[in-house]
Image (cartoon, rainbow, N blue to C red):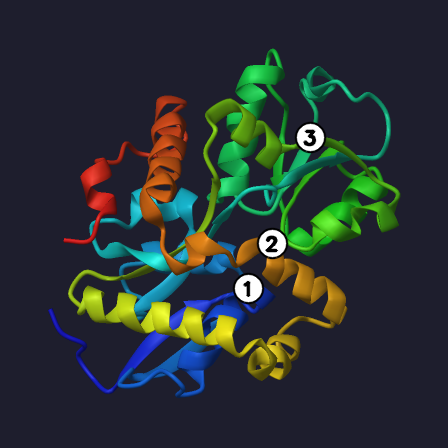
Amino acid sequence: MTVASDSLKIAFSPCPNDTFVFHAWVHGLVPDAPKLEVTYADIDITNRLASDGSNKLDVLKISYAALPWVLDDYALIPCGGALGRGCGPLVLTNGGSSNPASLKGRRVAVPSDRSTAYLLFRLWAAQLVPGGVGEIVVMPFHEIMPAVRDGLVDAGLVIHEARFTYPSYGLTMLADLGSWWESDTGLPIPLGAIIARRSLDLAAITRWTQASVEHAWKHPQLSQAYVMQHAQEMDPQVAQAHIDLYVNDFTGSLSGSGYAAVTSLLTRAAEEGLVPAVDPAKLLLP
């Protein structure tokens, strides 16, 4: 396995946690690492790119929920991603009942149907919404809270900085799916994964990714301008809260509990018919 050239093509989101993690590598601050040619795209787009056999990307940040469709071609890199506690998606409504069963037959907006947020929502609903929810409406995540506020949908599944901003839309949290998952399993929440083509030097990519993470932690001020450049007019305090929430020990190393969380999520989702079954051995580097 080799790195085929002096550069790698990578795709990750413009969200603060991703730009924070990859700042050092993107800016040539990781010794001996090849240059990165970066595509910035929201995770629903990178999920699709990873499963598109014609794409020429070497490394991507995708949702853990998308892994079952890409593991033949891509390996899970055990660092750089997003797992954690207290950082799960929320189910929001515009007031009304606080009983999850009130969502029976209702229209719910989600940011992607191949996201960890969506899998958590469906697993939660299978337990707590007898008869199931109604229509699932996929829309860009920044449109979800206005749609709930304006009554275009009955509830919305939100991610990222919406955890901090939903009260400004006058919305109510019906459920914190992260809290539900942690209570139900005792495991962290698997959100975003770094993957790389199996034909590449996966040990080297892991090493460079870890070095980029460690540089970001040691020199956080160096990445601030880059983070804010891509933060889509986000308030700097919200951007920092985003980094604090999603960049943690699991970003440095997936570890045993991280692998257990990923295995549990994908196994339970496969049992519900939401994803193809995955051999846990394929989650490990060869």
x, y percent for residue 243: 60, 62
Of the 4 image quadrants, the one containing the N terminus is bottom left
Q: Residue at x 34, y 36 (%)?
A: 260
Element at label 3: strand
x, y percent for residue 130: 61, 11
Tell me the amino acid under the disc marked 3.
Ala
Tell me the amino acid under the disc marked 2.
Leu
Image disc number at residue 245 = 2
Q: Nearer the viewer, residue 194 or 56?
A: 194
Element at label 1: helix
Q: Is residue 175 visible?
A: yes
Q: Please say if 169 is above or below 269.
A: below
> Does residue 286 appear left or right of residue 225 in this picture?
left
In front: label 2 or label 1? 2
Image disc number at residue 206 = none
Pick whichever of labels 2 and 1 is earlier in the sequence: 1
Tell me the amino acid under the disc marked 1.
Asn
Q: Are marks 1 and 3 in contact (CB under 8 Å)?
A: no
* Residue designated by label 3: 175
Outermost residue, front side? 218
Q: Are marks 2 and 1 in contact (CB under 8 Å)?
A: yes
Q: CA distance from mark 2 to mark 3?
A: 18 Å
Q: Residues within 10 Å of mark 2 (few under 14, many from 20)?
A: some
x, y percent for residue 19: 53, 72
Q: Please say if 71 is above or below 92.
A: below
Outermost residue, top side? 130
Q: CA distance from mark 2 to mark 1?
A: 9 Å
* Residue designated by label 1: 17
